[in-house]
Amino acid sequence: MKTVHNFNAGPCVLSKQAVNASMEALKDFSGTGMSVIEVSHRSKEWKAVMDETEFLWKELLDIPDGYKTLFLGGGASTQFMMVPFNLLEKKAAYLETGVWAKKAAKEADFFGEVIRVASSADKNYTYIPTNYDIPKDADYFHITTNNTIYGTEIHTDMDSPVLLVADMSSDMMSRPVDVSKYGLIYGGAQKNVGPAGVTFVIIREDILGKVTRKIPTMVDYRTHIKESSMFNTPPVFSILVMNETLKWIKAEGGVQAINKMNVEKAALLYNEIDRNTMFTGTAEKMSRSIMNICFVMSEPYQNKEEAFMDFAKSRGMVGIKGHRSVGGFRASLYNACPKESVLALVECMQEFEQMNK
Amino acid sequence: MKTVHNFNAGPCVLSKQAVNASMEALKDFSGTGMSVIEVSHRSKEWKAVMDETEFLWKELLDIPDGYKTLFLGGGASTQFMMVPFNLLEKKAAYLETGVWAKKAAKEADFFGEVIRVASSADKNYTYIPTNYDIPKDADYFHITTNNTIYGTEIHTDMDSPVLLVADMSSDMMSRPVDVSKYGLIYGGAQKNVGPAGVTFVIIREDILGKVTRKIPTMVDYRTHIKESSMFNTPPVFSILVMNETLKWIKAEGGVQAINKMNVEKAALLYNEIDRNTMFTGTAEKMSRSIMNICFVMSEPYQNKEEAFMDFAKSRGMVGIKGHRSVGGFRASLYNACPKESVLALVECMQEFEQMNK
C-alpha cells in the first residue's frame, strides 16, 4: 500500500484503530460467525453496539439528561428539512456563513418565515459575522459551526435568546461542546465521527410536539426517539465504524485531549501559511477554522498553483485541492489526521519555497 | 469462526465474494492507499463505482430507457413518504398484504385520499388478495411484492390500469422483473442486494413533476435524478457492498439463474414442511414466498416448539424464529443463502421427527 497523507474534506481519514476494528467486525462480528452486515439488527449483539454508541456520545460530550442522541440515514441535508418540519411554527432565524448554511435556510423557507440575521456572502464567506440581532420571537436560531468550504468556524458555544440549532457536521467532537446551550445539534458523520451513511442528531426532547402541522413518520424526531433509532433498519455498518471512532477518541483522552491536538496541528499549518510568502490564508484570522485550512498562492506566485499541486501530490498529499468556489488549496485536519501528515505538508510548502527562490 | 446457517430475515446472509471484496476495499480501495470510507465521494475512483452500480442494475434487470436507478439513505420507510410526496395529487390505491404495506398506506394518508383496494388482514395476511378493483382515477396503485413477516409473495408483474408502484424490499433481484410495467420500484437493500444503509429506487422519469404541492429538496426524486444520487454524500460503503453483490449475481448467471436456484431451494424446504407431519406451513400455497418460508409446529406437537428451536440452534441454524405476529419459524432463503444451509435445515427437521416418533 502506498503512503498517503489524507487531507480529504469528508469522507476523510479515520483512525487506523477504527478501520481495523471495523474490518474485524466485517469478518466475524462479536463471535457470531457472521459479518456485521449479515446479522439481525434486532440481535442482542447489535443492540449492544447501539446502546454503547449512544452511551459514548453521552460520555464524550457530557450530554445532560433530557437529551437523546439519534443515528439516522439521509445525511445532514435531510436535517435541513427535518429541523423546520419539527420546530418551525411561524418564524426561524438563520446565520448565513456559507452555501451549506444557505441551503439549510432555503429549506426552512418551505415551512415558514425565515429571517437571515446576517451573511458573509459579501466577502465570499471568509468570515463569521458578528453584531446581528436574533429576533426574540423566532422559534429557533440556526448556525453552521464550521464552514468546510471556506475554512471558517464559530469556536465557542454562543448564548442565544431563542432555541439554538447547530449543524456541526464538520467540527463535531473536535472540541468540548456545552450541549446544554443547544436545543438540537446535527451533522453527517463523515468527518470526525465516522464514515458516510449515518447522521447524528442530539436533541432536547422537550422542544418537540409544539408545531401544529402534521409530520410524516420518518421525518418526525419523536418516531426515532421512541424507538432509539431502531424504528426501521439502521445503517448498521456506518454506526459500527462510528462506535469504533468514538472508542478511539475516548482512548486518546476524550474531546479535550483531541482539541489540544487539533489546535496544535492547525497552528503548525497556519504558522507556515503566515510565514511563507508564497502562500496566503483566505479566511479572516479571527474566523479561522481548526478543521479546514484554506490558502491560495500569494499574488506574485499565482502561476505556480499547478506546480505546487503536482509537487505536493508527488509527496503523497491527497485531497488538498480547494473547493472551486474558493480555489487554491484546502487541507482538512480532522481528528484522525496525524500530526505527521501536517508536518509533511508544511515540509512541502517549505521545499517549494526553496525551489522557487 | 463457527459454522452458521444464516436464515436472518434482513440484514441477512450475503455472498462470500461480496463480503471479501468489501473487506479488501475497506483495507485499500482501488489502489488509492486509503480505505473506501476515507476517500472523497467526488474522486474518480468512487465515481466509477457509482456508474458501474447503476449500470449493473440496468443490465441485470434489463431496465428500459427512460428509467433512472437511485441509491438513497433512509430505508424503504422513507420511500413510504417520498412516493406520495412526489406522486399523490388526489387519490392513491394500496393493496394491504401485511404491516409494511399497511404502514406505506398510512403514510399516504398525510397526502391525499387513500383507497385500500383489498386486505388479507382477516387471515393474518397469510394470502395475497385477488379480485379487487383498482380505481381508474387513482394517481397510482401501490403493492408490496413480498411480505417478509408472513411469507407471501406476488410472483408476477401484474397489469395495472394506473401507474404501478412496488415495494420490492425483500424479493428484488430474486427473479427477472418486467420493469416496464412499473412506474416506480423501491426497496431497502438489506436482503438480496446488499447491506443496510442504502435504498434503491427505480423510477420512470416522466411520472414526476405532476403534483402541485411544493416538495422539500431531499424528498424530491428530481433532486437525486439530476445529481445521479450524489446531491449529497451517498452512503458509500453500503453502495460498495451493493456493487459487489450485483457483480456476484451477474457471475452466478444473472437473475434468471438466481431465480432457478431460489425456486429449487424453496421447493426443498416447502416439500419437507408438507411431508413432515410435525410441521405446518402458515401461508396459503398459492401465495407462498420463495424468499421467506414460515411454518409452525403442527397441532399435536405445539409443545415441541422450543425443543426444535434449541435443536436447530445446536446445529448452527440462525435467525429461524418466526416474527412474533406469526409465531413458529421463518427461514429466509435470500439469493446468497446457500443450498447447503437449506439442506441442513431440512435434515434438522427430519432428525427431529425421528427423535419424536
Image: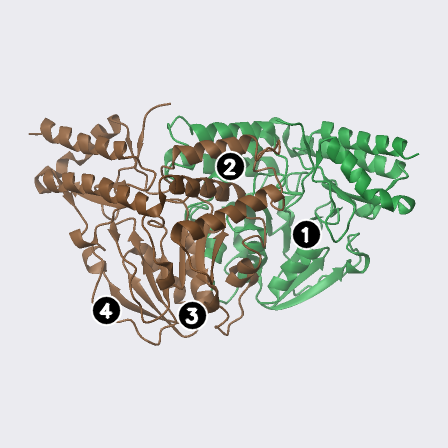
Chain colours: A green, B brown
Could one spot residue A260 in this view of the protein? no
Is B32 left, or right, of B182 in this rendering?
A: right
> CB under 8 Å between callouts 1 and 3?
no
Residue at mark 1 shares a chain with residue at mark 3: no
Mark 1 crowd level (few <14, some 14–19, many ≥20, 10 Å Cα): many
Question: What's under tag 4, amino acid-wise?
Answer: Tyr
Q: Does residue B344 sit above or below A105 in this rendering?
A: above
Residue sitting at x 60%, y 45%: B41
Chain ID, mark 2: A
Q: Which mark is residue B88?
A: 3
User: Mark 2 = which residue?
Assistant: A53
Question: What's under tag 2, amino acid-wise?
Answer: Thr
Q: Which mark is residue A144?
A: 1
Could one spot residue B347 in this view of the protein? yes
Q: Nearer the viewer, residue A215 or B330?
A: B330
User: Residue A23 placed where, x, y %?
Assistant: 50, 29
User: Residue A220 placed where, x, y %?
Assistant: 48, 57
Mark 4 crowd level (few <14, some 14–19, many ≥20, 10 Å Cα): few
Question: What's under tag 1, amino acid-wise?
Answer: Thr
Mark 3 crowd level (few <14, some 14–19, many ≥20, 10 Å Cα): many
**Marks 2 and 3, Cα distance to the nearest angstrom?**
38 Å
**Dot in front, 1 or 4:** 4
Is B287 left, or right, of A188 in this rendering?
A: left
**Dot in front, 2 or 3:** 3
